[in-house]
Image (spheres, rainbow, N blue to C red):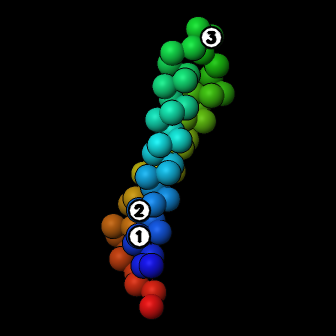
Amino acid sequence: MTLALVFTVLTLALIAAAALLLLLVVFRRERQPANLALAILLIVLAFGVWWTAIRSPLTIH
């Protein structure tokens, strides 16, 4: 398993969690700023992991 694959799986997991949380926040009647902030934070973290994966393609054997 390469490091790029680990980063890709981690990015997909973060994106899925952020999308689910964002959908829950948007479709709930009472929108809590903390949950919206958490969803945005997860999206930013996913972008950071993706950016790291494409900028430094390290391989571990």
Q: In which quarter of the image is residue 15?
A: top left
The mark closer to the camera, 3 or 1, is 1
Q: Residue at x 49, y 25 (%)?
A: 23
Amino acid identity at mark 2: Thr
| Category of crowding for the residue at label 3, using alpha-carbon neighbours closer than 10 angstroms: few (below 14), some (14–19), many (at least 20) | few
Residue 59 in the image: above or below residue 46: below
Residue corresponding to mark 2: 8
Q: In the rendered structure, are the residues bearing label 1 and label 2 in contact, judged by CB atoms less than 8 Å apart? A: yes
Q: Is residue 48 left or right of residue 24?
A: left
Query: Residues under labels 3 and 2: Cα distance?
Result: 33 Å
Amino acid identity at mark 1: Leu
Where does residue 48 sit, x and y in percent of width and height? 46, 56
Of mark 3 and mark 2, the one earlier in the sequence is 2
Quarter containing the N terminus: bottom left
The mark closer to the camera, 3 or 2, is 2
Where does residue 11 sit, x and y in percent of width and height? 45, 55
Query: Residues under labels 1 and 2: Cα distance?
Result: 5 Å
Q: Which residue is drawn at 46% across and 35% down?
A: 19
Where does residue 8 sit, x and y in percent of width and height? 41, 62
User: Is residue 29 among the parts visible in the rendering?
Assistant: yes
Q: Residue at x 51, y 39 (%)?
A: 18
Q: Residue furthest top?
A: 29
| Category of crowding for the residue at label 1, using alpha-carbon neighbours closer than 10 angstroms: few (below 14), some (14–19), many (at least 20) | few
In terms of secondary structure, where does tag 3 sit? loop
Q: Quadrant of residue 61?
A: bottom left
Residue corresponding to mark 3: 30
Query: Residues under labels 3 and 1: Cα distance?
Result: 38 Å
Amino acid identity at mark 3: Glu
Residue corresponding to mark 1: 5
Where does residue 12 sit, x and y in percent of width and height? 43, 52
